[in-house]
Amino acid sequence: MPGRSETLLAPVPRNGRIIEIGPSFSPIAPKAEGWDARSVDHLSREGLVAKYTGHPGVDVNRIEEVDFVWSGGPLSDAVPVPLHGTFDAFIASHVIEHTPDLIAFLNSAATLLKHNGVVVLAIPDKRYCFDYFQPLTTTGQIIEAHAEQRSRHSGRLLFDHVAYAVSNGGSGAWGQCPSNGLRFMHSIEQALDIFGARDREYIDAHAWRLSPASFQLLLLELARLGQSDWQVERVTEAVGCEFFAWLRRGGMAAAASQPAEAFAARRMTLLKRTMLETRAQIDWLLAGEPELVTGPLGLLPATAAAAPQPPPTAEAEPAPPRYVDWFPDRENAGRAFEGEWSSAVPGLSTTGNIPLFDDDRIVMFEERLGGFAGKRVLELGPLEGGHTYMMTRRGATVTAIESNVRAWMRCLVAKDAVGMAGATFLLGDFVKYLAASPQRVDFALASGVLYHMTDPATVLRNLCLCGDAVGLWTHYFNAGPLRDRYQDNKFDFKPREVITPHGRVVEYYNQSYLQALDWKGFCGGSAPGSNWIRKQDIIGIMEDEGFNCEIFLDHPDHPNGPAFCVFGQRK
């Protein structure tokens, strides 16, 4: 899997000119690695070395020469005027949340970048760091700070920053894991002291508390109001304590072109997503501290002791309206499944955030397969057709089987939106399809599927029987990280053994979906739980069926459990 810097720099040409804001001791685009980069920081290199010497985990040797020292005023004023408008990328990692005037910060980016330049941001997700109990920032707060031309943080903001900062298990930044003991980092008396010092000196703090959906909403509203021309080109889900965002110009024109009803619908969708994001924060809290639910709070404790709830039936789901009074627009195809999308479908702004229509994993499978052109492909669980789209665009003929009715319908919506000549989406149970010994294909893909199966060994064996090559992306069982993350709430760590026809003993570890079953966009298995298997069992089953296997993108610390890619080629 690409590293953090590689991911952030993906849209930046290797010979592009970069301005990096506040790289401190960890530059994203180091000059030492050949990047044509300039840096802006609040201290010279010597000052940064003196500041960070002795800090645990900081390698001061990574601190590079600072090109421009910023000491106040608009950020762009720190850079000589002849360099304005000459940069291809403006990079800021864990910086934007500190700036007292966010609109001025974005305006400085516009001043420094070429017209087609990109803003690259790494942003702390307030759900997974010391901002945990702080409310999300609103557009009104941002506009107020800009109207006041704020150059330092308000007393109220400084007080809240100190009074409500918390650690989780002793850390001020964590990730997608159960709560491990939330503790205040400062006393409330210290918060009052900071409030009293607000006029004497600049005090650093987080001014803005953000999540992926809330950040998209802010940029959308600022563009509609003519406050900023930046629009979100792409945003990731949180990984660890942060998420990434890439911005391009054109936000004002894009927002102004939307009819009022469509714009309001987009705002409402993003607001609802912030509620789902908050739900995820609550779920992780309850996973670590289920005893918090002591009354009828309308919340489900995430405990293994609770009886598994059956998956929602089609009859139990709120039915979509039979008729709508929306103004006809292609965007409405995405709105029909509002709140259910996972993928970011090109051309449908009301869909999800996960970039499955531009996924490096499919590119890597293609390289190992020797190209998709002319290949017959069987795909299990296409979700919303993102990988199908990529393979058909590269010349494959794809039969994709999806058993979730509404996911299958979203595949059809996506097919109409982006065009997928050569794609056939079949509604049905692929487990039964594989068991019926279908005609062999050139490549069989199961991405995000195996760990949803109740009998994964049989599914994997049958998948191998129908493909000359097989590609998997899947979670796998590894007791250490899973026990640390879920603390016996989700997994049964006592295995059940099954024996394959080749005599291989495979260990099944049961997991429960818990609250995930309540989300109407849930697209996991059809049972309340599934069985995960170990990495060595996955490889062993494929080798037993006559495949040479290559492992790549092995991610043992994946936030949802250890995961990896496997490409198998028949011997």
Image: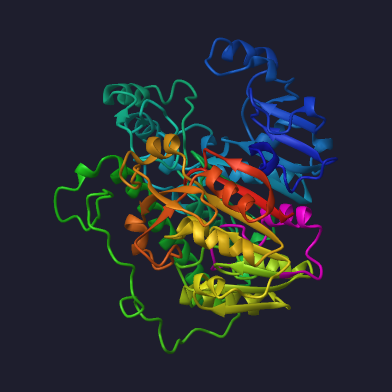
In this view, 507 is above or below 5: below
Residue 462: in magenta span: no
Is there any visible trace of residue 291 in the rendered image?
Answer: yes
Residue 271's quadrant in the figure? Answer: bottom left
| Residue at x-position 64% and y-position 26% | 26
46 sits left or right of 309 in the view: right
In this view, 56 is above or below 31: above
364 sits left or right of 492 in the view: right
Q: Give the magenta part as a residue range.
A: 349-376
Q: Position of residue 257 (x, y in %)?
A: 63, 72
Q: In front here: 17 or 520? A: 520
| Residue at x-position 55% and y-position 36% | 99
Residue 370: in magenta span: yes
Q: In front here: 425 or 463? A: 463
Farthest residue in the bottom direction?
323
Q: Position of residue 394 (x, y in %)?
A: 78, 66
**Magenta stretch, overall SS:** loop
